[in-house]
Image (tube, rainbow, N blue to C red):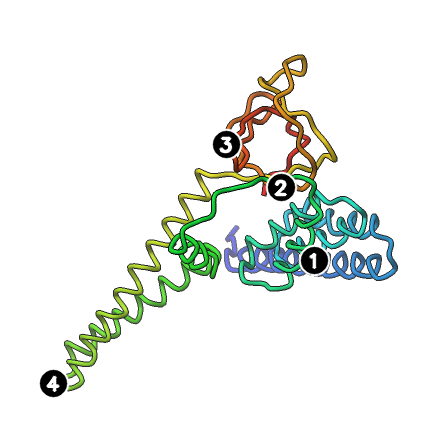
Amino acid sequence: MKINFKKIFFLIFLLILSSVSLFASNVDELMKLGNEHYQKKDYQKAIDSYQQLVDEGYKGASLFYNLGNAYFKNDKLGYAILNYEKALKFSPGDEDIQHNLAIANSKAIDKIDTLPKFFLFQWWESLLAIFTITGWTYLSYFLFLLILIAAGIYFLVRRPGIQRMSFFGGLIILLFFILSVTILVVKLNREESIKRGIIVSSAISVKVSPDQNSNDAFVIHEGLKVQLEDKVDNWVKIKLHDGKVGWLPESDVGEI
């Protein structure tokens, strides 16, 4: 009996295609349902619809933005800020997300004083925030392609004027390529080494050690952004912007 591999591969392809179509259709339906609940001011049902998409593995700026809005309207400040921060990771330059995040942060109780950054560091942070990791990756590939094109023109076209333009143009593109790759590496290192979270409980006593019976170190409230340092069982070690450290239950903080 001869096996027709072409038919098998075609059937597998159709199954994959139909699965993708069903998933996309389900995403659209749940987003539409969540939006309808939001417009009717039934914010908890809107949260449930959006959260179902998150639980199924769907991620995106619009989803987290809508989820943040629903939580904000439902008076869950910590979860609102958490989802705005997640949305900002997918779309760093989105003004609507930045605006709503600023409003939510203004309602947070805890205001941690930090030393003002040197203006060059502020410029550098602004430069990092222009694109996501994916955006800087695409830009690096595009610039590398331009370098290859400039090199090809330089070696293939025998006109001195064009060769001069392609040479200096290639050098300028190379500088931008190096900058783009540098920023990409920095963002990748930050993604791997620095984890941040948002306090989602209304108020929590941070402990000196990962033990419910240990002494209280300080009290913090929902919406505060912290750095996640370590984890032991169901406890997370956090660090505030002013240098304070302590432990709290994992359920009281959401990772961005």
C-alpha gap between disc 4 and disc 2: 62 Å
Amino acid, disc 3: Gly
Label 3: few (<14), some or many (≥20) within 10 Å?
few
Relative depth, front residue between 221 and 52:
221
Label 4 near label 3: C-beta < 8 Å? no
Q: Is mark 3 on a helix, strand or loop?
A: loop
C-alpha gap between disc 3 and disc 1: 48 Å
**Among the two numbered marks 3 and 1 on one chain, the one whose residue lies closer to the N terminus:** 1
Q: Is mark 1 on a helix, strand or loop?
A: helix
**Among the two numbered marks 3 and 4 on one chain, the one whose residue lies closer to the N terminus:** 4
Question: Which quarter shows the C terminus?
Answer: top right
Residue 179, x across and y down, in percent: 32, 59
Label 4: few (<14), some or many (≥20) within 10 Å?
few
- Disc marking residue 243: 3
Q: Is mark 2 on a helix, strand or loop?
A: loop
Instruction: Report the residue marked by disc 4.
Output: 160
